[in-house]
Amino acid sequence: MTTFEHCVRCTLCVENCPVFKVNPAFPGPKQAGPDAQRFRLDGERSVDDWVKLCCQCQRCQVACPYGVNVSEIILKAQLKYSHEHMSPFTAHLFANTYHLGKLASLVAPVTNAVTSSGAARKVMGVLGLATNLPMPEYRFLTLNRGRRRKGKRRSSRKVVFFHGCYLGFNRPDIGRGIRDLLAGLGCRVVIPKQTCCGLPALGNGDLEIAKKFARKNARVLVDYIDRGYQVVYACTSCGLTLAHDYPEVLELPEGRKIAENTYNVHEVILDLLENDAADVEFGEVNRNIAYHIPCHLKALGIGYPAAGVLEKIPGLKTTVLDDNCCGLAGSYGFKKKNQQTAEKLGVAAASAIKALEPDALISDCGACRMQLGHYTGLPALDPSEIIIASLEKGASKKSKGKRRIP
Amino acid sequence: MSAYEYDAVVIGGGVSGIMASLTLASGGFKTALISRGDPVCCLSTGCIDVFSHSDEPLGGIRALLPDHPYSLVGEKGIVDALCFFLEIMDEAGLPYEGDPGRNRKILTPIGSTKNTCLVPQTMAHADMSPGEYLHVISFQGIKDFFPSYITSRHRNSTYSVYDAGVPTTLGIAARFDDASFLDAFITWLRGLEIPHDRVALPAVLGTIDPASVMEKISQAIGRKIFEIPTLPPSIPGLRLFRAMKRVMQKRGIHLYWGKDVTSVERQGRTVEAVTLATTGRAKRVQGRVFVLATGSFVSGGLFAGRESVRESVFDLPVTVPGERKDWFNTDFFSGGHGIERAGVRVDRAFRPVESMIDNLFACGSILAECEIMSLQCGHGLAIATGVAAAKSCAQELS
Ligand SMILES: Cc1cc2nc3c(=O)[nH]c(=O)nc-3n(C[C@H](O)[C@H](O)[C@H](O)COP(=O)(O)OP(=O)(O)OC[C@H]3O[C@@H](n4cnc5c(N)ncnc54)[C@H](O)[C@@H]3O)c2cc1C
Ligand code: SF4
Ligand code: SF4
């Protein structure tokens, strides 16, 4: 494993840091990571409060040609700092997005009315929450309440779908679409009982809550892995947490096993199309789409598998953009102290998208879609929504009513 | 999961690997590019040195020994490759200027001039005639840029300092992307009523479209403007890399970024796939031909041990000039260090010699005998050999 000692001070990480670019209070990944690490001692109280300004996009780590685990060093320094200092109310709130989501979706119409009301927004301001973005809406019919199994029982392809909080509580319709898409391509799909991946807790400095969530999920997922299932995720931040943080940061004993058996949903779809020769036809979709790559998809290092699927759709023009962080970074941008950073980055990412004059944007991450939908004014979709639209068109062309796909 | 099979898989995302993938994609081949991290290009001036050691680049190249990579490409191949690069940059919206047959000068932050060949539009006016007047703009608190170094070397020059609110080159460049910041800067600059012929600034005129920023300023004050490259983090280097990447994405090249190629699958004399250490689990990438463009020591394509130099992906034979004691020279900048000649030796088709692999090609600074530091031929050599290696790949594929 490469450590801070392998840093040659080339500054390539600095060139890629979105926060450093717009917030002079943050000294950048080289200083916050490997440089400061030389002075961080166990048992000595952290004084580097700016370390919390890092949004954990991991762009620094992706850029470093020497394999220095820059953002992981910073994350650990953030956790150490939070552990030693009382964290504010907002941090606890966001650390617990899962319980918050569960509660909010039970009383969905009330939640949505309250969070969008003027008075609530003032209260949020006092609590240290930024208010220029609409708060995400909650749905009553969450993924936990829909159909939990789908697809041929005997299929040799078995997947267990880790949908995470955003698709679970806020966009269960997208989650159900993905479930049906996989089943239509010949997979056996299971949506198990699951809880938050733990990333919001990590991002808000709460290692213990993160571990609690992770252990719960690990038990469920490992049970399926042992029975020949692959874990699939659609939210790339959940994916990165399963594949990286479970073994490396949370140090779960089952972490390695989970990481090795976890796949992006589009990796699975591509494989079904290329190697299992799933019998489907892509219908024409005449659209010009900007594909905003979420930072955490980049950090996974698996390339951009959804782009590989979208290439197969006739008539579709997709332009990949991977140089910008949307600025929201989960709950980061909802905090008042990060509001300016989030806004500047959001505006920059939105202008790169608008320069392409697309009719919609897509992104694998719900937070990116919220932020960039807001700053571009464009429809912000999940890649699966385009794929499904194309397959539905293809299926109806192929034979009317013979076989509905997916 | 085996996933995709590509026609060509390029390993290394520097200038040579990028040019190789663009050449292959232009030929209609399904291409993937894998890179462990960002290339040294992002630390460079962004200017393309073809052979800056002599005033006349092609003349210098003609005098090289036959085993220098440039000699393997040949003069026509070099010029064609550089023209292809110019086309790519036009398409990317970061136009470059220059003539492959002639070197030009840029100004450095210490006030000296430096030979180079192709430059971004924002440095095109740096080639000043003697006696011309120059006004330098600096920024409050900016590191490693001291205008007095420049004014002390140029008789007819003066300087002023602007407060951009941030001291870093990246921070200032990001502000120049914003129209209201640019307007305020222009208003200030107008107020100075500069009488000089030209105005120079450190290279911070925006991260995205510096040519338009320059044009706006130039129009407003009626003077020629140019940028002076700074020490890393280097904005012109970053712009060059990102612009090339934009074209790669437009051409449908699949990028796998931020992870190493850790192992290679071979079947007899053929490489069938490489394995990428992605987060969590290894990923196989299959291809029909492979291009090695992992750079030299700085990027880790070559690794120097106590006794020998190793090539880090395929463990190819590496040419080393003599014993370890002959690799060095006490003066760092003197040039002619033996270690500069170390690398992978290739034949005329850019296949590594004695590799026992038929579908592998190599290009860029990993090649033996390049002597990039002393000849000052970094990006130029990367462009020429990247295109040449890709052409051999294309022949192998069809
Ligand atoms: C500080 C500096 C400034 C320079 N300035 C200039 C200049 O102004 N003008 C000029 O013309 N030249 C300049 N040069 C020289 C020039 O930058 C290089 O010679 C040229 O760009 C090399 O390109 P390359 O493609 O061969 O390799 P590199 O740019 O070194 O790229 C190699 C890539 O391969 C990747 N890689 C390595 N190993 C692996 C692996 N196992 N798996 C996957 N990926 C891997 C690396 O991460 C890297 O991205 C400069 C060089 C330096 C060091
Ligand atoms: S990119 Fe890596 S080696 Fe370079 S300064 Fe950053 S951490 Fe250090
Ligand atoms: S993780 Fe992102 S915000 Fe944090 S230091 Fe790295 S690049 Fe900057």
Image (cartoon, rainbow, N blue to C red):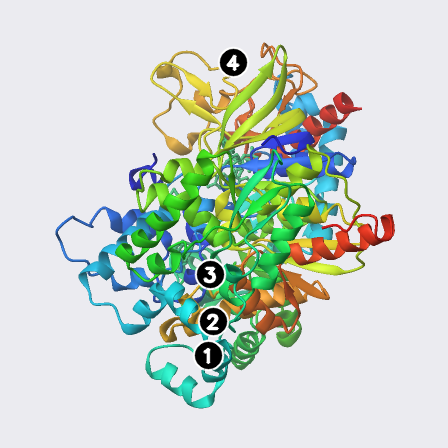
Q: Toward the viewer: A60 or A206?
A: A206
Label 3 within 8 A of ligand 3 by Cβ? no
Q: In the drawing, what numbered circle is on residue A111?
A: 1
Horizontal and vertical percent position of residue B59: 68, 30
Horizontal and vertical percent position of residue A17: 44, 56
Mark 2 falls on what kind of element? helix
Q: Amino acid at mark 2?
A: Ser
Closer to viewer: mark 4 or mark 1: 1
Label 2 within 8 A of ligand 3 by Cβ? no
- The chain ID associated with circle 1 is A
Q: Same subunit under labels 3 and 4? A: no
Discs 1, 2 touching: Cβ within 8 Å: yes
Q: How many tags in the picture? A: 4
| Residue of label 2 | A105
**Position above or below: B324 against A186:** above
Q: Amino acid at mark 3?
A: Cys
Closer to viewer: mark 3 or mark 4: 3
Crowd tier of the residue under label 1, counting other residues whose Cα lies within 10 Å: few below 14, some 14–19, many 20 or above: some
| Residue of label 3 | A165
Q: Is residue A340 visible?
A: yes
Closer to viewer: mark 4 or mark 2: 2
Mark-to-mark CA distance, 4 and 1:
66 Å
Is B294 on the left or on the right of B24, as rendered?
left
Choose top left, top right, bottom left or bottom right for residue B196: bottom right
Mark-to-mark CA distance, 3 and 4:
52 Å
Quadrant holding the C terminus of chain B: top right
Mark 4 falls on what kind of element? loop
At a point 60% along the width and 36% down the height, the residue shown is: A157
| Residue of label 4 | B317
Is A118 on the left or on the right of A202, as rendered?
right
Horizontal and vertical percent position of residue A144: 49, 60
